Structures are given as C-alpha cells and as structure tokens.
Amino acid sequence: MAAASGGGQDPAFTLKDIDQVDIPELVQYAVTFIGRELSLNSLTRYLITLAIAVGGIAAIWLVKGLISRWATKWLASVDRHRVDYRMAEDVGNTLVPLLYLFPLYFALNTLSFSRPLHNFISFIILVLFITRTVRFFSSLASFATDAYLRRHSQSLDSTVGRALSPIIRVLFWTIGLTIILDNMGFQISSLLAGLGIVGVAVGLAGQTILGDFFGYLVIIMDRPFSIGDYVSAGDAAGTVESIGLKTTRLRTTSGEVIVCPNGDISKQRIANYRLMYRRGSTFTFGVAYETEPAKVRAIPDMVRDAAVNIGNLDITHVFFTGFGDSSLNFQVAVSVGGRDLNEAMAAQQELYLGIMERFATEGIIFAYPTRTLYFANATPPVHAGAGVP
C-alpha cells in the first residue's frame, strides 16, 4: 500500500481524563479523519481495488475444492496405507484461507493512505497472514508426525502422539508470536536474551527434570520400545506400562512396578525382547559313566526325537562335549520361534520332559556328583614259614 505524501497535520486530540471526553468532538475527529483518507484516492481506484479483491477471492472460492482435494491427494501419496485422510483434508482446508489473503493484499496495495493508516492496515494483514500460516504449518507438521508414527504402528491419538501434538503447536505459535512482537516494535533480541538467562537459571536448577524430559523426547522419537514391550535397561527389566514426561514404568514378572527416570533409560543399553523373532538357549546335562558306549552314541538322536512333536522348537545342535569329574557331558542348543517368553519356556519344558521319559525307557541314568574311594591294605601280607619277630 502506497502511503500518501504531504497533506496537513492531523487534528490534535488528546484524552487527559476519561471523564473529559467530548463525544461530539470525538465523532467530528473520526469523520474528518475518514473523509481525509477517502479523499486520497479516486472512485476509479476504489472500483479497481474492489474488483481485484472480489475477483481474486471469488476465483479462489471457486477452485477451493480442487485445491483442497489436490493437497489431500498429494499428502496421501506419501504413504497410502498409513496416512490419516482426515488430517490430510485438514491441511488442505487450512491452505485455502491463507490464499484468500493474497488478492486482499494486492487489492489494498493499489490504494494510497496516510502513513499511520498504511502502517495499521499492513500490520493487520501481517497478523492475519502469520496466524493463518502458523495454522497451516502446524497442520502440516502434525500430519507429517502422524504419518511417521503410523509407520511404527502408532498415531497422534496414541500416548506418544498426544504428547507430541501440544509441543508442535506451541513451537509454531511461539515463532509466530515472536514475529508479531518484532513488527510491533518490541526488542526481540533483548527479550530473547532475557529468556535465555532465565532458561539457563531454570536449567541449572532443574537439570534432572530437563534431562528426564529430553530423555522422553529421545524415547518417543527414536522408539527403542513401546508400551507392552518386555525390555531390560541396566538392572531394570519388565513390561513397559507407561511412558511419561519424566519416568517410564516397568512391571516385572514378579508383579512390582519399577519407576525408571527417562534420562537414565536413554543412557542405558536397552534390550527389547518383543523384537525377537526366535529365542535361542543352550543347556547341558550329564549321564553316568556306567552308560554303555552304544547308548552314549545314540543320545543326540534321542534328544532330537524328543523335540519332533514340539511346535516352533528346533534343535540347533547336540554334542558329546567331554568327560566330567562324575559324568559324560552333553550340550544342547535349541531355538524357539515367536516373541512370547512364556511360550518359549513351555516348549523348552516339554523338551526336558521328553528327554527324561526317553532316558527312563532306555535305562540311561542322569549323573550327579559322586566319588568312588579305593582303600589299599596298609599291613604287609604274612608268608607261610616266615618267623614272627
């Protein structure tokens, strides 16, 4: 908008006291101000401005359905099977009001006003533009976050999503408010410096809390585990029940709940057992030395036969590993399919029982610590005919 140059001085009008306001004088001042501003432009220019504004807004209104559908279709193409179409439509709908501001701005820019009115109108358009832009990019960021979470079997309706949504909105609205305050004449650099000092003080006072909060951000973004996973982190192990801003709660197999600070968890090596496709384990046993060599040779086949009817359990290897102090030692490696610990333990239990039953049938005895002692006669033998001293 071009600001008018020249012109007389604005009528002086000051309010020293609210009780001394002269209503007729205030109305006269307003009429004079409006008349002077309107006289700065011809009727033809007003008609051109109106035509530009109405024509531009009408054109956008006519194609807003196409714009919304195009934006929705383009966003949905990111991942057809996991996007939330409602959120994609919301992004498209927030784009249309933002486009309305452009013909309005170009139309008003054809008019000439005094510097104060020009600055005021420019500020109003800027505020509208920033608020609509913040709405659009907040919706776009929420959509992108939701698409990312859905790839990991989550969404913004989940616990993680509900925690991320306000963070996204606060971030964008903070940026928008900062731009508005800067255009209003506030010293943003001084304000940011003051906030920085306050932030340092708060950070020093609450290092542990902030550390746990950033640990929470690491957990929800990197996603080393989700609610319902059985994990171990350091000395703690259990099923994840909740992931909070400060702590994560694990329920152990014995029933108690372990409350772990997020900052500590993010520094630990985390083992997530839900991600296991197979569980492997190794165990050993020994049989008595009295076992016949032919039966010792047949033991690996007996162990494999015991595992034939156990679902999802495979024998990796069975070896006669050596001669122990009181047993002939064997090593068995097994692999159980699936992620459930209880199912894996039940399958291994069936294998143990099957081995015991087969050994009982074959007369093979499991060894246990034994010791055999041999006593020598300490008195020398007496030979016939020898004299007795």
Image (spheres, rainbow, N blue to C red):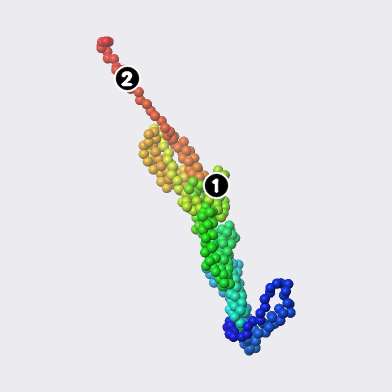
Real-space Cα distance between discs 2 and 1? 66 Å
**Quarter of the image where one finds residue 62:** bottom right
Q: Is residue 97 above or below residue 151?
A: below
User: Around disc 1, counting alpha carbons within 10 Å, would you say few (fewer than 14), some (14 to 19), or many (20 or more)?
Assistant: some
Q: Nearer the viewer, residue 382 or 219?
A: 219
Instruction: Please name whichever residue, 192 or 281, is drawn nearer the observer in this view of the structure.
Output: 192
**174 and 352: which is toward the camera:** 174
Instruction: Look at the numbered disc 1 and give the secondary structure of its residue.
Output: strand
Q: Amino acid at mark 1?
A: Ile
Q: Mark 2 or 1 closer to N-term?
A: 1
Task: Identify the image quadrant of residue 144.
Answer: bottom right
At horizontal 69% and vertical 81% (from top left) the residue drawn is 29
Q: Position of residue 81 (x, y in %)?
A: 55, 65
The image quadrant of residue 325 is: top left
Q: Is residue 369 visible in this depiction of the protein? A: yes
Q: Amino acid at mark 2?
A: Ala
Q: Regarding mark 2 in the picture, which secondary structure is present there? A: loop
Residue ID for mark 1: 258
Relative image position of residue 330 (x, y in whole percent): 40, 40
User: Residue placed at 51% from the left, 47% from the top?
Assistant: 237
Q: Residue at x 50, y 55 (%)?
A: 224
Question: Which residue lies at the image location 36% right of the left edge and 39% below the top edge?
Answer: 322
Please tell me how many numbered marks the rendered image carries: 2
Q: Position of residue 44 (x, y in %)?
A: 63, 89
Residue identified by numbered label 2: 378
The C terminus sits in image quarter: top left
Whether the residues at callouts 2 and 1 have beta carbons within 8 Å, the answer is no
> Is residue 24 shown left or right of residue 345?
right
Please name whichever residue, 308 or 343, is drawn nearer the observer in this view of the structure: 343
Q: Is residue 276 visible?
A: no
Looking at the rendered image, the quarter that the N terminus falls into is: bottom right
